[in-house]
Every structure is written in structure tokens, then in C-alpha cells.
Amino acid sequence: MKTCRIFLITALVLTAFGVRAQIVTPEHEARARELVSQMTLDEKLAYIGGYNSFYLRAVPRLGIPEIWFADGPQGIRIDSQSTLFPSGMALAASWDRTLAHRTGAGIGQDARARGIHVMMGPGVNIYRSPLCGRNFEYYGEDPYLAGETAAGYIEGMQGEGVMACMKHFAGNNQEWNRHHISSDIDERTLNEIYLPAFEKGVRRAHVGMVMDYYGLLNGVHATENRYLNIDVLRHRWGFKGIVTSDWEATYTTINAVYNGLDIEMPKGWLLDPQRMKELVGNGVIDERIIDLKVQHVLQTLFSFGFFDRAQKVETIPVRNPLSEQAALDVERGGAVLLRNRDDLLPLTRGKVVVCGPNSELVAKGGGSGEVFPFVTSTVAEGMKKNLGRKLRFGYTPDLWKTDLDAFYADPSCTVRGATAEFFNNPDLEGEPVHTEVVHRIGYKGWESPVPGVVNPDNYSDRYTFYFKPEKDAVLYFSAGGDDGYRVLVDGEELIEQWSGHPFRQKEGYKEFKGGRTYRIAYEHFDGGSEQETMFRYADYLNDPAFIEAVRTADAVVVCVGYDWYLESESWDRPFALPEGHLRCLETILEHTDKAVVVINSGGGVEMAPWIDRTGGVLMAWYQGQQGGDAIAELLTGKISPSGKLPFTLEKRWEDNPVYDNYYPNTDQVKEDNPYKRVEYNEGVFVGYRGYERNGVEPLFPFGFGLSYTTFDYSGLKAEAAGDGEFIVSFDVTNTGRYDAAEVAQLYVGDVESSVVRPAKELKGYEKIFLKRGETRRVEIRLDEEAFRHYDCIRRDFVVEPGDFDLFVGTSSQDIRLKTRINVK
Ligand code: BGC
């Protein structure tokens, strides 16, 4: 038997370009102070606003280097390719500190390879509702899990010499109306639930930068919120780094200046140098407060060594095998198996059908968290690689068709294909300069699609085709373009992204009535540089051969869920699966009870209406660039699933403890409030804390995830280790047939307290890999953080001496061992 101390050793090995923790020392402060004293007022005022969207300007006269920022947090989002990591929720679901560290280190190395100084991540807000559009970037509903994951990520990244920017401080738990919504959170709830992950990022991981979010906390915008930026961040946590605004999240000048914001991004609009100079001139703004902001920035840059070394490391490849491997491993460890009826999985023999709208794409969350990878692997591709002599495809998973054989170029449906028209303007205006019948839509290049006729830098094209199904039919469309593109059915937009941008892609679905003729058009324009058109469709749901394959298959892998344009920052999403995806799933479920549903999403999805009719469900999250390989390895048993839910999955959204306190069921305070107000009336009872208190049975509890093997727990001991700390130890044995990893979870409950507290709260966990039959002793140290609660009278955390229950289990509800300790 070995004691589990895996994390530290692996983390050290991974820090290939290791730099010491970036702690601001008195020396850095002195160097910064000296520089500030040499800067003119104009230089200082210009310095605290970004420029060129993602930069802090250089001051060559004083040797201050230009600082380059990039998004975050799933990899590097700039106008070129980079490693796309699985979403934050997948990382949290791995419950693996090593993977968190490797993710941060991998992204850090990708940044060094490009010369980027600051990465805008991690995102550490708490998952409160499944609807929040940014859940995918975050680390779930529990502050301890979120904090541990965040700290690992930050330490990994900063160990590579890249500054992490932890966001979005604080209370950004919905994306709806994000500039104008106030999260009204009482002080205890804020400190126990919504701040601890930030606290760990600052105190333990020494994050260099914190980003204030768009919305308001208790009626005051984050960028001017003294409680957040000064009382908590600076005074209580001792933060010496930089406070930045989110992009266009500064709303006033004076309040922002005096309440802790250091820099305004992406430029100084409210902190406009001219306006500020006048305010300094007439005494409204004290120049010393400007000095302090510049001081915060410079001392942090010194602590990262940005003055003393080049940020770009030529020896790190831009396409970096180390970060690609980390990305793949996160999905291997983070996908959560929720259902496996009668051990349908792993798939080792027989015929398998792979289908569904997401089977041939790598779905990802949208917005600033989106990354464009060098390499991708879809579930269909991954499954193909993992077939064998005994496991075969029951239907060729070439689901998207690019030929236009199902359509006609003329309304009377006599000529197969589509009529293409090209216009030498971007608006499809006037007479076409070229017309022809084509059999596929797909062009990529810098040259004109019709040389000598169509202007390659300023044109538009329309492909019109007619569809006349004999019987009712369903078609899925996948279209893309560089620049704008759209798909219209009988003049109605089905897919639309009509703006200038690099290649982007969207899907859509439509039901058609048999016997009717429909006019379909793919339209595109190009505004310069490279051009690309793409159109494909899937009609397999109408194909009797496909339905027969489904009926006779030993398993049908159905890939459904969201993608970047359905789940993203700036808006919230519904709880149910997207309509076309649900339709596809329901059709499959009519013909088989062996469907294994693979879900792409950033958080909870409504499953109760259909899950009982499935054979299996795998939460794949957004799986990252080559996650298709990882998913296939999990489905075929090369690896046993070991991810666990980082949130509670409800049967109905109404069951969620925050339901009554999430818009539109909130904002009942007063009609004429200037801001929408979300009152967090559930208090600390968010997630499993709330389900347990309300006695509501979720579909799957927090911490739940199936494995192909079984684990036994025994021998629980809790020993006092001095200074109010305890060492909790127990044995975990792999009693099943597969080598596999397990996440052993430790929850703590206060037996008697002067305030109402949750029945239990996660305070420790360890992910351990066990071979068949192997036993390991797990050791978890509990310090005062495990027992404390926030006292709103003393305005600080306190530990009330007395009895505490310790619960050890494989999920928040499957508790295997229990003991009681007395905290003095
Ligand atoms: C997002 C931030 C991001 C920033 C820069 C904002 O819209 O909220 O998370 O870092 O844009 O892209």
C-alpha cells in the first residue's frame, strides 16, 4: 500500500520552462516606485488604459516593455491557431489537480511560444444555474473544487512565466443582460460561496491580475466596487497585482479611479487621459491615486521578470506537443459517465452506429473562450480509430454530404445541383456577373472563384437549389464562410452569420413536408483577403438503411449538444437540448434502447424526459481539439471513465435551489430599479447544499460519475495534527475488473452551529489511479478552511469549536465512511 502524494511530484516535472512564483517583493515595489517617480503625468495617464485592444503600451524612454494580453481560458484566442483545451467545466470534472496544473502550464507554454505576457483566464465564477452562458469556462458549483482547480491552473501557467488573469470578479453567475444586472448577494454568502475560489487564486497561487466583470455587485459596478477591489482584494487578501476592467466594463471615471480599478481595457475611455488630466488639474483626482495604479502594474511586471527577459521563447514550438497532450488528457480524465444500463459500455464487440449533429465536429463554447486549433478529432473519427476485429461500424459515419444530389437547380426539379450566381459587390445586388450550375458548394483560397470575372476581394455569391421530398423529411445543414454566410429556406433565415470574419461555421435543422417544393439558398460575401464557402447537409434520419442500422446495432452513439453559437458569453441558454438535437435523439430512441448519448455542453442539460430510454450517457463537455479520440477511448474501454460532476444535475430546472432567484423569476424588488436585480435569496444553499436542505432528489448528485470498475472504502481515521488541523486517512481498493481512477471525496458537516449551515460541504478530495485489486491509503489534511464559516457581525471567518462530522464517499450522496471529530 502506498500513500497518495501524486500531485506535487508530477507538477514539478511538468514545469519545463519553470520560473519561480511571482510574488511581489519589496525590491519589485522599490523598482516600480522609482520608475513611477520618473514618469510624467501624461505618461502615467496614458499607461493605465490599454491600446490596440490587447496591449499595455511601452514607454521606451524608461525601458517599460509593451505587454501583450490574450484570451483565455481554454487556450490562446488570437487570430491564429493554438491548442484548444477542453472547457473549464471538463477540467473541474476531472477533479485532478495535476491536470489543472498541466492545463495552465500548457497554455502558458503556448503563450511563451508567441510572446504573450498575460492570459485572460482562468474563469472561476460559481455555477449557480445551468442556464448561464459562461458555465463552460468555469469550475462548477462548489467553491473548494473551483478554488483547487483555479489554483492549479494559475500555478501551472505562472510557472511558465505567463501572468494569469483571474476573472470575472465577482458574482458573474449569469450572462443575461450582463452590463446591467446586479447580483445582490449577502456578505456571508459572498464570502462562503462566491469569493473563495478568487481567494485561493490570490493567496495560494499569487495570481498576477484580477478582472472586474461587467455587472454590479449589490448595486455597484464591479469596476467601482470598493468592497471587492479594496476591502477584500487588497486589504483582506493582500493582493499586490493588477486590477483590470473587463473589455468595456468601466462605466464612470471618478468612481472607477477611487475604488480600486488599476487599468481600463481595451483602452482608456472612461479613464481617458485628457479628461483625467483636467480632473487632476482641478484637484478632483489626486495624482497619488494614479501613481498607485501605475505602481501596481509595474511592480507586478517586475515580479514576472518582464523587464529582464524576452517573453517569446523560440525553443517552444507554436504547435506544442506538451500542451496538445495535456488537452487530450483533460478530456480523458474529465468526461463523466452518467448512465450505463446493463453494462452496455464499454463497447468491445458488435456493430456500432455513430451519428448525431455533433458527431463530426469539435464543439466548443463561444466568445472569448473560443480557440481555433491546429488539429481536431471528432467522435466519429475517434471511434473509427478504436474499432477492432470484434467492434465494427454498423453504418458508415460519413454523415455530412457535400454533393448536392438531393437537390435541383431549377424550380421544376429537373436538373440536379444548384444554380450559382456571382456578383461583383458584397450585397448580391444587380445582375450576376457569372452564373453556372454546380454540384457542391465549397471554395477556399486567395484567388477569384471565377478568375478574370469575379473580383476576389469584394464579391458575393448565391447558390439556389430546390428540395422536393416525397415523404416528410428532416435535414440538418452545416454552413460556414469567410466572411459572411447564411442559409435561407423559402426566404427565411435558418443559419446566419452575415458579417466580416475569418472562417466560421454553424449548424441548423429543418423539417420538410412531403410533396412540397422548397427553395433553399446559401449566400456568402467576401470583403477581402482569403475566401471560403462551405455547405453540407445530413439526411440520414430519412434513410431507411440508417434506421435499419440503428435497429440492429449493438450500440448507437448519438452526439448532441451545444456549440459556440449556442452557448457563449453575452447570453444564457435554455436547459433543454437544442431542438434539432432533441429531434434526432428522439428519432433514434424510437428504434433502439441501446443509444449512448454523448453530450456537448458547459453545464447541466435537461435529461429527465428521455434518459430512461437510453443505454448510456456520457457528459463530454466541450472536449477540446482531440477530445473525439478521448471519448472513443472511454466508450471502448481503453480507459475507464473517472470524471465526476462538478455540479448537481436537476430533473427539472424548477428543482434547482436558485430557480426562484434567477431571472426572470427575480427582480421583484421594485419596478423602477435602475438595474435588473438578481437577489441570491437561496444564500449559501446553492447546488448540493440547497438540494440537501430542500430535500429535493436531483437526477445526478454533485460528485457523481460512473466507472467500469468498483471501489471499496475502508479504514477511516482522523488524527489531530496540531494548530486545529487534522489528517484524515482511509483506504480505497479497486475491487472490479478494470484499472481505473477514482475521486475520493471528503465532506465536512458542522454538528452544531450558531448559524444555519449546509449539512455537509466538500473540503478535500484526491484522484487516485488504482490497478485491479490495488489498495492505496489516501491522506487528506484539513485546516481551518474546512471548519470555518463567515460571521457577518465580526465580518470575518470564524471556526466555532465543537463536533464536526466527516463523510468520505464517491459522490456527495454515496457516502461510504463516516466519523466525528472535535475541533478545539
Ligand atoms: C470577456 C472577457 C474577455 C474579454 C477580452 C470580454 O467580452 O468578458 O472574459 O477576456 O472580452 O476578449
Image (cartoon, rainbow, N blue to C red):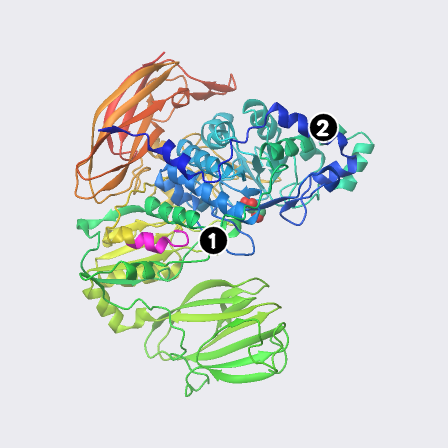
Where disc 2 sits, the SS reads helix
- Quadrant of the snapshot with the N terminus: top left
Q: Earlier in the sequence, mark 1 or mark 2?
A: 2
Q: Is residue 191 above or below residue 344?
A: above
Which residue lies under the disc numbered 1? Answer: 319
Which residue lies under the disc numbered 2? Answer: 34
**Residue 265 in sight here:** yes
Q: Amino acid at mark 2?
A: Glu
The local crowd at label 1, few if under 14, some if 14 to 19, many if 20 or more residues have their Cα within 10 Å, is some
Q: Amino acid at mark 1?
A: Arg
Where disc 1 sits, the SS reads loop
Magenta span: chief secondary structure: helix
Residue 624 on the magenta span: yes
Q: Is residue 319 above or below residue 389?
A: above
- Rendered location of residue 498, percent (x, y): 56, 65
- Rendered location of residue 151, percent (x, y): 45, 33
Residue found at x 59% / y 25%: 25
- Rendered location of residue 80, percent (x, y): 54, 56
- Rendered location of residue 730, percent (x, y): 24, 26
Judged from this view, the residue extending furthest toward the front is 315
**Disc count in the image?**
2
> How far apart in space, not on screen, are marks 1 and 2 (Cα)?
40 Å
**Residue 491 in sight here:** no
- Quadrant of the snapshot with the C terminus: top left
State which region is magenta: 623-632
The image quadrant that residue 776 belongs to is: top left
